Image (cartoon, rainbow, N blue to C red):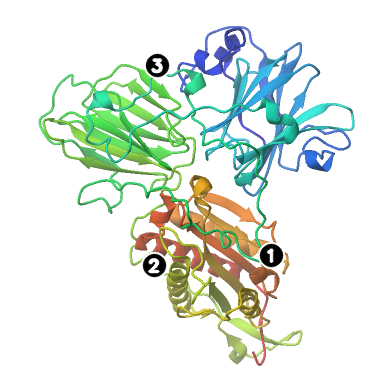
Amino acid sequence: MKPHVILLSSLLSCAAAGSWAAAQTDPFQRSAPAQSTPSLRTAPPAQAPAGGAAGSAEAGSATPAPAGGGALSLTGVAGTSFGLPRASSDGSLTRVVFDLAPGVTYQLTPTFGGLRIDVRGARVLPAVSARLGTSVSEYRAGGGQVTLVTPFPLSLTDGWRASETTVATGARVLIVEFAPTLAGGASASLQSLVRSTAAPVSPDARSVLSAPLSTVATVTAAAAPAAASTPAAPAASRPVPPTPLPEGLPPGDAVSAAGKTALPLPAPALPGPEAGQPSPLSGRAPGSFQAGAALTVPRLGKNPGLTRVVLDLPPGASYRLVPGGVSLRVELDGVTASSQTGQNVSPELRAWRFEPTGQGVTVTLLTGTPLTSRSGWRAQLLPPAGGSDRSRLAIDLAPALADLTPLSPRDRVVAAVPPVPVTRGTAILALSASLVQPRVVIDPGHGGRDPGAVGTITEKEVTLDVALRVRALLRAAGVDAVLTRETDTALHGNKATDLEMRARTGTPGTQLFLSIHVNAMEARTALRGYGVETWWNPNHPLSSNFATLIQRNVVGVTGAFSQGLKGNRSLSVLRNSRVPAALVEIGYTSHPVDGLNLKDHNYLDRVALGIAQGIREALVSGVTAGGVAAGK
């Protein structure tokens, strides 16, 4: 995907200052000082020389960036420069490739919010890109630094991988890859170039609602040095190679989420009787209006995977929440405030800003990850705490927060699916009586003595719960939905045999096969795993199309974070199926926020509806194994 590039002319002065963040006091700057600057433009993907520039250093060669990758182009700049990388994505993995001019050196610093590259011997070309790929949500460069912002934290060995290689022309390139489940860190030859940072102590989101303002950590532009803005995850002594999954098992099946190391505590719920209700999009603080009441800086609390922002509203003040893109805008009437900013607060809150308006103040919370009208955030207006007259607008930010709005009775209906013709050999029987209901197989993962992933929930219980909901929706729509298991049982005591038996239910006469699972990650990397992903294998020409429909519909209905499509591992339950087949991971039980989604009946309703709608779309659009064989 070509990055969308925004020229920030004011950043050109950073080269002499030597610090990107020190020069950027306002991340929401609307205009730049007038000056003569180079022109920044988006260029077509660069043609890599033979051997390319985006391959694996371990393989000893490099390959051109895959289709869809892009390059940033700067004109009017002389001398040795660094930046403007090529980028591409494959599923959740994003690869970024930098050209290294002779004499250029650098230092790599993995942090809680991404990877920082400090460059010496070259001028870093100022640029900002909203997105380089699935796992790089932002690219920032200038003042001797490049920052690749990720939607998950990095440690010295987890979440990223870096290596150098030499292309056919003799030029050096730095290859950096990012993915939530990636492990390895810097290659052995780059170990000396890696630096770690320490994580500051921050308040817990459970106490921020009641803590006095003076005791709660806040970050302002004047008091937030760039070097300490992004804390690092726990360090490790040396790179740990990724552990391959056992042959044929779905992702997460080899992980004991409830192992010896404790998982992060579940995210705290918002207090009050309406904590389980949809977040209000507007409201008003009770009491008489107070003219000239000032809005104090937000109080901030941080929990693993979630950041809480509390705005103290004076009596009579009203608010409106406007989520969209990668920010949440809070429009306040009846308050005053000067322009203020806070930057690099947490992985969930990149920055906040107060902007005075004619009626009050607009508060912008920049998340860096997508928000919808009902996901990525939640909010609640709480009454004043003891001794105060100010109501508390509490806003939780987390990319793993899904849409937990209850479905209406009208939404719980899947449109009817027309019957399909019976086939005998290659001929379709012409009689109208030979039309039958399309048949699909739904496979609830695990069962019996095999619990699957265990964390906030137990996988085998949730997969069966969802499968039963899907079956009810599909049967009401005219689909013969068959489950591989209807109770807490396994098909066979041997795991390999059990998976093969499930796959064999996808035989001729069946249009589609879908396996439902819950994902998990080890405790030390649990914060990197959240959202929905769908797997497919090349067992059938239409399996990838089917997986695409399932992923799109489930994410669309739930608002869950999309981990995308995966097809780089052979899974027994898919490869042994003879019809279009997919495996959907509906969330991570090991994640402190996503695990709570999996406990919520509204979320499970939405997952089931998304799956049923994806199956229906496949059936009516021809993404199936064809007609039903006679005698089946």
Mark 2 crowd level (few <14, some 14–19, many ≥20, 10 Å Cα): few
Apparent side of residue 274 relative to residue 120 in the rendered image (left or right):
left
Location of residue 418 in the rendering, given as x and y in whole percent from the top left corner? 55, 77
Residue position marked by numbered label 2 in the rendering: 412
- Foreground disc of the pair 3, 1: 1
Q: Residue at x 61, y 31 (%)?
A: 4
Whether residue 92 is situated above or below residue 97 in the rendered picture: below
Q: For residue 584, which numbered disc appears in the image?
A: none
Amino acid at pointer 1: Glu
Q: Secondary structure at mark 3?
A: helix
Residue position marked by numbered label 1 in the rendering: 247
Report the number of discs: 3
- In terms of sequence position, does the residue under pointer 2 or pointer 1 come before the other? 1
Location of residue 307 in the rendering, given as x and y in whole percent from the top left corner? 38, 38
Q: Give the CA separation, mark 3 to mark 2.
A: 51 Å
Q: Give the CA separation, mark 3 to mark 1.
A: 51 Å
Report which quarter residue 155 is drawn in.
top right
Amino acid at pointer 3: Ala
